[in-house]
Image (tube, rainbow, N blue to C red):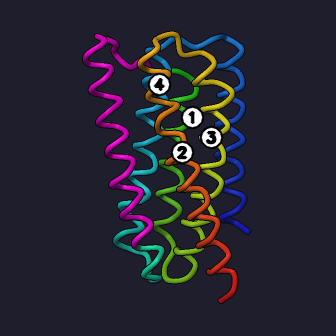
Amino acid sequence: MKVEAVTVAAFLMIGVAAGAQSNASINDAQIASIVVTANQVDIDAGQLASKMATNPEVKKFGTTMVTDHTGVNKAAVDLATRLKVTPEDNATSKALKAGGEKNVAHLKTLKGAAFDKAYVDHEVTYHTQVLEAIDKTLVPNAKNAELKALIVKVRPAFVAHLEHAKSLQKTLAGK
């Protein structure tokens, strides 16, 4: 229950920040910051899972998150550099970073099956929230066509990650 409470609290904070941010109409520099931060949060958690997970499939999933999200971040940073856009911190990117740090700190307190379950549960919630942010905030507010295209292009990977995490969640619940 504690894991779920931490996760829910972190994502309520992100949801509130994203909602406030979308009402204020965010700019491309802020969107770039959100994209980079969201990916870094998943990279950090994935690195921890690739080391601490006991279930081989969870460990493999963590490694996949690191690889995939590192690739997206590289593409986002390369695009921002080419467009001469400096990512700008904002309420959403700050909430994402804080939520990610809290998640990693919490995960570090867990071991074995409890770690595996908490990590996978978080990944399901996180990818659900990121997809919502992509659909409701990032794509609708992106002004630069290349930035919008990058976000649209990587969306299917987030969907695949969510489905993979849900599958792992079902497997872990069956044990």
The residue under the point 57% across, 28% down is: 92
**Of label 2 and label 3, which has the lower sequence position?**
3
SS type, badge 1:
helix
Quadrant (top left, top right, bottom left, bottom right) of the C terminus: bottom right
Q: Mark 2 is on which residue type? A: Pro
In the image, residue 17 sits, relative to residue 23, either above or below, namely: below
Percent across and percent down for residue 150 are 44, 28
Q: Which residue carries the number 1 mark?
A: 95
Q: How far is disc 3 from disc 4 in space, using C-alphas?
A: 15 Å
How would you classify the magenta stretch by its main secondary structure? helix
Using the image, determine if residue 118 lies above or below residue 97: below
Residue type, label 1: Ala
> Horizontal and vertical percent for residue 82?
25, 16
* Label 4: which secondary element: helix
Tell me: residue 12, above or below residue 17.
below
**Is disc 4 surrounded by few (<14), some (14 to 19) or many (20+) residues within 10 Å?**
few
Residue 52: image location, x then y, percent = 39, 74
Mark 3, Cα crowd under 10 Å, few <14 / some 14-19 / many 20+, is: some
69 vs 54, nearest the viewer: 69
2 and 3 marks in contact (CB < 8 Å): no
Bounds of the magenta segment: 60-89
- Are the residues at dot 3 and dot 4 in contact (C-beta closer than 8 Å)? no
Residue situated in front as seen by the camera: 58 or 150: 150
Q: If you read the primary sequence from the N terminus, does the residue marked by circle 2 or circle 1 appear first?
A: 1
Residue at 33% x, 15% y is: 86
Expressed as whole percent of the image width and height from the top left, the position of residue 35 reads 46, 32
In this figure, which residue is indicated by the disc labeled 2?
Answer: 156
Three-letter code for the amino acid on which mark 4 is drawn: Ala
Mark 3 element type: helix
| Residue position marked by numbered label 4 in the rendering | 149
Q: Are marks 4 and 1 in contact (CB under 8 Å)?
A: no
Q: Which residue is mark 3?
A: 131
